Amino acid sequence: MARYTGPVCRLCRVEQQKLMLKGAKCSSDKCPINRKRLAPGKDPKGRQGKRSDYGMQLREKQKLKRIYGMQEKQFSLFFERALRMPGITGENLFVLLERRLDNIVYRLRFATSRSQARQLVLHGHIRINGKKVNIPSYLVKPGDEISVKETSQKMPVIKDALKEYGRSGVMPWFELDPDTMKGKFLAVPRRSDITDLVDIKEQMIVELYSK
């Protein structure tokens, strides 16, 4: 499946909630979902039919896939890996998604969105334990150090993103030194720790793939 290249704000309107795909814009008054309450193409006077179980399961999968900026095939592979892991499949899926390098670059405040973080990784601005890694789906391990390449530390896009660290810090499974732009992945989070995604019903995603 090809990567979506249209306006990402449209995706939030489809799901009728903020997926935080545009960084700071999503938290501002400029966010279109604050003004456009209907999903694209919906007639405000039209009848709203009841969504089927399959429809609700599909929407949960689409939301999670879009939040982490993944294509269909790649998301399916992550689910299959989560299924083979011991424990609860839905929680395993979240653990794998949170360990993705592009997500961790975003969580460490080196980028304002996961898509921006993905670009930083692809362009070689990120180091893991001092070595360049330019694969966004690379799975970071507890104890790994994630840093910005020394010659990239002057980039305005990274400096601006790091301002958020002063306002809200980082998730408790990270530590960060904003001055040296070095962070550490301390531990794999539990599902209950991922408080910004509590609205996602991962059990529905498991049920969808189990059909």
Image: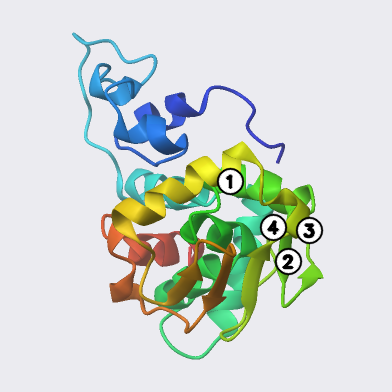
Q: Please, what is the three-letter code of the amino acid marked with disc 1?
A: Ile
**How far is the residue under mark 2 from the one under mark 3?**
8 Å
Image quarter for residue 183? Answer: bottom right
Which residue bears the numbered disc 1? 158
Which residue bears the numbered disc 3? 134
Tell which of 105 and 167 is nearer to you. Answer: 167
Q: Please, what is the three-letter code of the amino acid marked with disc 4?
A: Pro
Which residue bears the numbered disc 4? 136
The residue most toward the bottom is 86
Query: Which image quarter is the N terminus in?
Result: top right
Residue 153 placement, left or right of 50: right
Q: Residue 23's spot in the image, x, y percent? A: 44, 38
Disc with the residue nearer the chain's start (2 vs 3): 2
The 10 Å Cα crowd at callout 2, few under 14, some 14 to 19, many 20 or more, is some
Q: Are marks 2 and 3 in contact (CB under 8 Å)?
A: no
Q: Residue 155's spot in the image, x, y percent? A: 66, 42
Question: In this orientation, does residue 90 appear?
Answer: yes
Residue 111 placement, left or right of 136: left
Which residue bears the numbered disc 2? 127
**How far is the residue under mark 2 from the one under mark 4?**
12 Å
Q: Residue 67's spot in the image, x, y percent? A: 47, 48
Residue visible at 48% across and 74% down in the picture: 95
Disc with the residue nearer the chain's start (4 vs 1): 4
Q: Which of marks 2 and 3 is in front?
A: 2
**How far is the residue under mark 3 from the one under mark 1?**
17 Å
